[in-house]
Image (cartoon, helix red, strand yellow):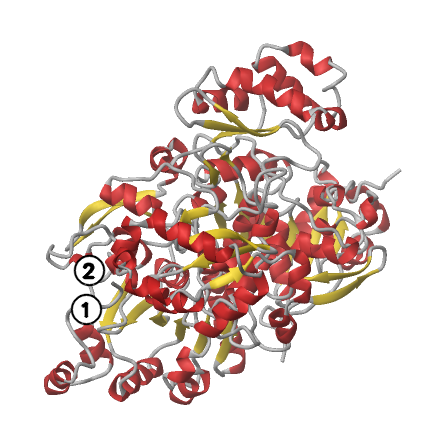
Amino acid sequence: MSVAPAPLAGIRVVDLTMVWAGPLGTRLLGDYGAEVIKIEGPRQWDLLRGLGGIPRTAPRWYNRAAYFNHNNRNKYAAALDLRREEGRDLLLRLCARSDVLVENYRANVMDGLGLGFEAVRAASPRIVYLSMPGHGKTGPESGYVTYGTNVEQLAGLVSVSGYEGGEPLKTGFSYGDPASGVAVPGAVALGLRQRERTGEAVFIDLAQRENLTNFVGEFVVDYGMNGQLRPPAGNTHPRFAPHGVYRSAGEDRWIAIACEDDAQFAALCGVIGQPELADDERFATMAARKANERALDPVVEGWTTRIGHYEAMHLLQRAGVPAGAVLTIPEVMSDPQLRARGAWSPQTHPDAGTWDVETPPWRLPRTPGHARLPAPGFAEHNRYVFRELLGLDDDEIARLHADGVTADEPDARSHS
Amino acid sequence: MPPPLDGVRVLEVGNFVSAPYCGRLFAGYGADVIKVEPPDGDLARAHGPFRDGVPHPETSALFLYLNTRKRSVTLDLTTPAGQEALARLAANADVLIENHRPADARALGLDHERLRAVNPRLVLVSITAYGQDGPYADHRSNNLIAFAMGGQMFLTGTQEGGPVKNGGYQADYQGGLNAFSAANLALLAAERDGEGQHVDVSVQHCMAPILEAGVPFYSYNGVWRAARRGNLMSGFMAVYPCLDGQVGVHVMARNWPNFARMTGHPEWLDDERFATAEARRQHDDELMAEVVGWAAGVRRKEAYAAGGEHRAPVTFIHTMADLLESPQLAARGFLRRIEHPVAGEAVHPGPPWWMGPDAWRDGPAPLLGEHTHAVLAGAGLDEARIAAASGTAA
């Protein structure tokens, strides 16, 4: 099978997103072939540039934050103050030469800048304009400020998460953000398809809370049918047991085990050296195991605490029992499966050096994704954008600098 | 206007959550989705929760939600007749979505070479725990195992309580949404030059890089934070008990002045312990004590409204009842009432993103095998072959 151009080759994206959800989404567009141009303001730069643990006395500290650099590879960057008329006009000119705009400001910010859908459409009649605010662009709460941990609270997810018998519990991180980010290529692909058919601009409103409510849809349907609020259920399953996380040898190490039928349970009993349990009437059927789960779990843990989590996983898998180590961050980065898949690969950045970054997550063997470019330094591609794309001459570019519409360095006083 | 995926033909040989969620998005945005089920049905039909708590294959909330607007065809893919019928359907499809272990998929006739021979344009999308190859490719997994192996579980919960998964089937949903994005990229490519491919979505590979700053900080800075901090990530990013539930705060540096004023504590702004983001980190325990005190005296909906008014990122923990009563969701028409012939009426989430009033189509989940005859007869199978393929032959 011959390799063809990446799916989004030839598509130019104006990226007005910051932090995680939006930048992850536009990075995926870049991973799969789009030319992504990230616009930051001299004062409104992506705050992740400042959250890298790099001392501000270090040269170009703002180009060396690892989290920023992971979320923004495969992008170009230019600086424009969109609150200035010249900045806004140049952005509209850039949109006229682009296919897609993605923004994740609070709902009314783009309209306030004079860069709402209608304004951009007037300049770029075939633009696919994707907004991804927390609440969506309309409705009484659309102006509320919201970030990733708020999104999971609004989506209903937190209310059904947590330990069995415990209070609702947040996720381990800003889960709403990546859930929105990975939706971006799908939404943009649908937008491009719609544009091809109609020849017209497309507006997409990705309300992050609504996207994430789709991840708990069965709870919504259940509540609507039965009027029941389901309490958090921890690692348990409504029908299967054992189904949980058990202590392994070592400090804070754990293994997840899930038996989905009698054969898997019998295999588990064999591995842990207690084959007679498979015939024990307390555990012989799925219903019995679920009813006696609290008696069963300590039996399983009596075995798991004696060996390492990876070793237990391999012993159980060899016997056909679903099991997986609860991987820490260092273990995720050294995991043999992820290594075999090429999930991590070294990348070199002119200011930050060389280290392992994630590769594009989905394998499309005929049209593969790539990690082509390291994340851009602040304003690194001003010249490409202003000269080549917008056709400004040196005097005009100098005037933008003199007027503070653009800059070569971010204003360090922001985000402190 | 026709919906964005109008005219796209999808075969879903999917079980439970990940592939069916991907198929649900295709169906919602207008594709014609044929769901191939084994003769005893998708596992989700057996899972519930059921209407009135009574198990029934047509009233599982999980199945009803994940399979809206699809057609159902039963095929016994363990038989040559079933596999032959599948190949017939694949010959006329643009996308085939499946989520079996690679070894199981091959046994069911879902291998790429075979499908490519009948339809070179076909985009075959496989959603698996680990991907198509590698040392764990044929390991057994489910949502719990995937959550552990993707690195998200270790970070979730408290130090004392141990790692815990999030509610429902979050690893499976992540796999389904990632697959939808990947499938649509491959579909654009196939429409350009008429060639499909085998799209390989590993749930582990989708999950492991998105541990917030975890991977970048470990890979580049060489540091990682092992502690699980439950609801109290930090003073300014936490879920706190309030008078009638819980409120969540997520205060970035730029929101701090608004947050202090909104809580009625403008004096925090003059407190040198809280003057800068760095100072607030240094004095996190003291800040948390102050915010705990504020939260203990507020009602959840009032705190949310005040946060909105002051542009401070404060929300309350929405239950399913709160979603159904949400003025925001109501104003946007997000929740849909869908009537099902056996399960009756239920409320369903609408589109994950809005693309115009006609872009998302609702419809009930199909009954098991409801469209077997119509679809297979339409593909040119006679009665005997339909019976053999669907496992209903005497």
Q: Which of the image's four quarters has the N terminus of chain B?
A: bottom right
Against B298, is A402 above or below?
Answer: below
Give the residue type at disc 1: Pro
The answer to which quarter of the image holds residue A76 is bottom left
* Residue identified by numbered label 1: A410
Residue A2, can we see it?
no
Tell me: A386 left or right of B1: left
- Which chain does tag 2 point to? A
- The residue at 38%/53% (across/down) is A368
Give the residue type at disc 2: Tyr
- Helix, strand or loop status at disc 1: loop
Q: Position of residue B243 (x, y in %)?
A: 58, 56
- The residue at 72%/20% (across/down) is A283
Q: Are marks 2 and 1 on the same chain?
A: yes
Tell me: B154 left or right of A263: left
* Residue identified by numbered label 2: A62
Q: Is there CB contact under 8 Å for labels 2 and 1? A: yes
